[in-house]
Image (cartoon, rainbow, N blue to C red):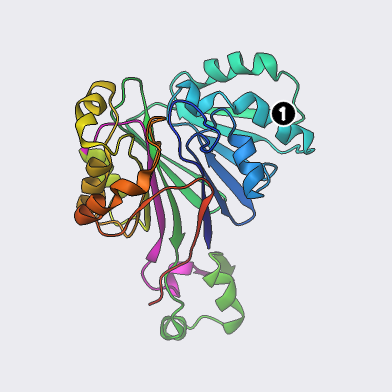
Amino acid sequence: MLDICLLGTGGMMPLPYRWLTSLMARYNGSSILIDCGEGTQIAMKEKGWSPKPIDIICFTHFHADHISGLPGLLLTIGNAERTEPVTLIGPKGLGRVVQALRIIAPELPFEVKCVEINQADQIFEFNGIVIEAFRVNHNVTCYGYNLIVKRKGKFSVENALQYQIPKEYWSRLQKGEIIADKQTVYTPDMVLGPERKGIKVSYCTDTRPTESIIENAKHADLFICEGMYGEKDKKSKAEEYKHMTFYEAAELAKAAEVKELWLTHFSPSLIRADEFMGEVRNIFSNSKAGKDGKTIEIDFSEE
């Protein structure tokens, strides 16, 4: 099961009723955070989720509303007596940016590792979650992310008997272990069927619509996408500043054939996002206006 929380839904600046856009995911005892603007750790506190288990922090880009909360969050994690390393992933230049921000957070009881994305598409894997970074189209280098939990194939008793595998090895092989027994080597593929559909969450913000978003979000269980503007007369402004309207995000969700769309990264001038959702759902029916603290538990689909 993958727990997802949209900690905040605002763009540009935090407001009294809306924190800046950030995503937190929990799986297998660890947490992943995507973006950390001003006030993100307050949003986390309001939700009741701890920052201590955060092992990975991914950054879409280096505008202040997506990274300026990092020094304070690192200090809070340090005050929680964490000693394990924290890995930061982001566009080229991440190390230099983090080094500058850490002038005000110089002493931490854990190591901070910076991993810079140096390709248009790049894959990382940590603790059972695959993180796919993909380039989008903003006025600075910016990436979207997929969080993927893979699912192994079903155990096949028929295959195990066919290969004459001793029963005491079955559960170990099912867990992915390779077993060498005298002159025979048993591998998991000998007892497992084809890989089954896992869990996929796609996240992108601060971008114009691109084909890469459609390709990377394809068949996602949840697609969290920026909708800076709900007002149709602001499309030209979205184009100028390389953002998206609600309707453009819905078109992407439709083209990518996702299960569910959450809109986020609302302009400070946008007060009631729900007012525009009727027309958005005419494009993609399972669209929802994001709300601070909005949470979902995504489990493997039944077969």
- Label 1 Cα crowd, 10 Å radius (few <14 / some 14-19 / many 20+): some
User: Image check: 246 left or right of 268?
Assistant: left
Residue at point 39% right, 36% down? 266
Q: Is residue 117 above or below residue 48?
A: above
Q: Does the magenta portion include 196?
A: yes
Residue at point 53% right, 38% down? 17
User: Image check: 139 left or right of 111?
Assistant: left
Location of residue 52 by image quarter: top right
Q: Is residue 81 above or below residue 200?
A: above
Which residue is more in the foreground, 132 or 137?
137
Location of residue 51 by image quarter: top right
Q: SS for tag 1?
A: helix
Judge whether residue 193 can be spotted in this image: yes
Q: Position of residue 12 (x, y in %)?
A: 44, 26
User: Image check: 49 left or right of 302?
Assistant: right
Q: Position of residue 252 (x, y in %)?
A: 23, 46
Q: Does the magenta portion include 197?
A: yes
Q: Position of residue 171 (x, y in %)?
A: 58, 75
User: Image check: 278 left or right of 224?
Assistant: left
Judge whether residue 224 can be spotted in this image: no
Q: Position of residue 89 (x, y in %)?
A: 50, 32
Which residue is more in the foreground, 40 or 196?
40
Q: Is residue 279 above or below residue 248?
A: below
Residue at point 48% right, 26% down? 13
Q: Is residue 102 above or below residue 23?
A: above
Which residue is more in the foreground, 68 or 300?
68
What residue is shown with label 1?
75
| Amino acid of disc 1 | Leu
- Magenta stretch in the rendered image: 184-210
